[in-house]
Image (cartoon, rainbow, N blue to C red):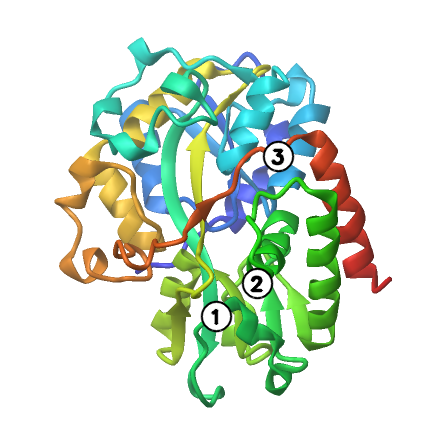
Amino acid sequence: MKKLALAGMLAIGLTGCSSEDPQVLNLYNWSEYMPQEVLDRFTEETGIQVVYTTYDSNEAMYARLKLLDESAAYDLAVPSTYYVSKMRQEDLLMPIDRSKIEGFGNLDDDLVNLDIDPDNQYSIPYLWGTTGIAVDTDDVEGEVTAWADLWDERFQGRVMLTNDMREVFHVGLRVLGYSGNSTDPQEIEEAYEKLAELMPSVRTFNSDAPRMPYLEGEADVGMIWNGEAVMGKETMPSLEYVYPEEGIIAWLDSFVIPKNARNPEAAHQFISFVLQPEIAALISEDIGYATPNQAALELLDESVANDRASYPTDADMENAEFQADIGDDALQIYAKFWEMLKSGR
């Protein structure tokens, strides 16, 4: 698996693009979430240059898209599951013109027409995955099988959490036996109190490259995205990905076109390009996340298709829970306790 070269794209920024230039696509995406080869091949095939800018959380992406006016808008973004619903309801997205999308029929029926976006009017699935437990088996003695194990005193000062409010609270809620999508203020507060007990063990929060604290010896156990675990294991064979007994966090990342996009035509072209089975397979093999493209599955290298970290079994997905849109009122409660958690109050 080759590493991704995004730093150069980041340096370009949005200001280097003219709103009158139809040969530029401004892509706003997660860090290390699109192989450079795909960007290069798209440019070679279409002549459209891609300006790639990154974010490290849905909250950061959402806040920036709300602030930008048309003169500095992005043409394509990649929010996670429930943020598609939130952005759609807040009229932040442009409808997808399905007549301009080729390959939609390749997508898994189980990952389209979801409640977050009925009939995929505003989004097209890109990749799906899970958030589970990373364990450095060289440094951790004994088994780690559950989210609750993170509270074990032997891990004090050695735990890594993603810098993602909903994901972290999802863990606290599931340990208590609640849904990770709870909107009950009492349950959310109980999750905060449970997570506060974990904080002495937390060494760092990381959603930029969650594999790095493990690779750099900063953490031995904690949260990680499955694709990051796959990439990390290449460098560090002792890094294992564990499906917690309480249930995995599942998510779907999708392409959306912001309402003030300057080049929606290029956005549609890029989506169609990524939906090509060969390209979708290349992406999955390169960055370790699961493709929703059924035609691409047949092209995957056997080592990738059989890797449980990337492609979980039915048993691994038992009790799995996709994050849902919980509404602004509940989000405000989460945000209050998230700030308290990270500030140590």
Label annotation for residue 146: 1
Report, in whole angstroms, how far the alpha carbon at label 2 lies from the one at label 3.
19 Å
Q: Kindly identify the residue that appears in the image at 43 percent across and 33 percent down.
A: 254
| Amino acid type assigned to the residue bearing label 1 in the image | Ala
**In terms of sequence position, does the residue under pointer 3 or pointer 1 come before the other?**
1
* Residue 199 spot, x, y in % from top left: 72, 70
Q: Secondary structure at mark 3?
A: loop
Image position, residue 104 (x, y; %): 26, 23
Which residue is more in the foreground, 310 or 118?
A: 118
How far apart marks 1 and 2 lie (CA) works out to 9 Å
Residue found at the far right of this picture: 345
On the image, the x and y values in percent for residue 59 come to 66, 40
The picture quadrant where one finds residue 143 is bottom left
Q: Which mark is residue 175?
A: 2
Q: Is residue 218 above or below residue 271?
A: below
Mark 2 is surrounded, within 10 Å at the Cα level, by few (under 14), some (14 to 19) or many (20 or more) other residues, namely many
- Please say if the residues under marks 1 and 2 sit with CB atoms less than 8 Å apart: yes
Could you tell which of marks 2 and 3 lies nearer the N-terminus? 2
Q: Are marks 3 and 1 in contact (CB under 8 Å)?
A: no
Residue position marked by numbered label 3 in the rendering? 326
Q: Look at the numbered disc 2 and give the secondary structure of its residue.
A: helix
- Whether residue 341 is visible to the viewer of this picture, yes or no, is yes
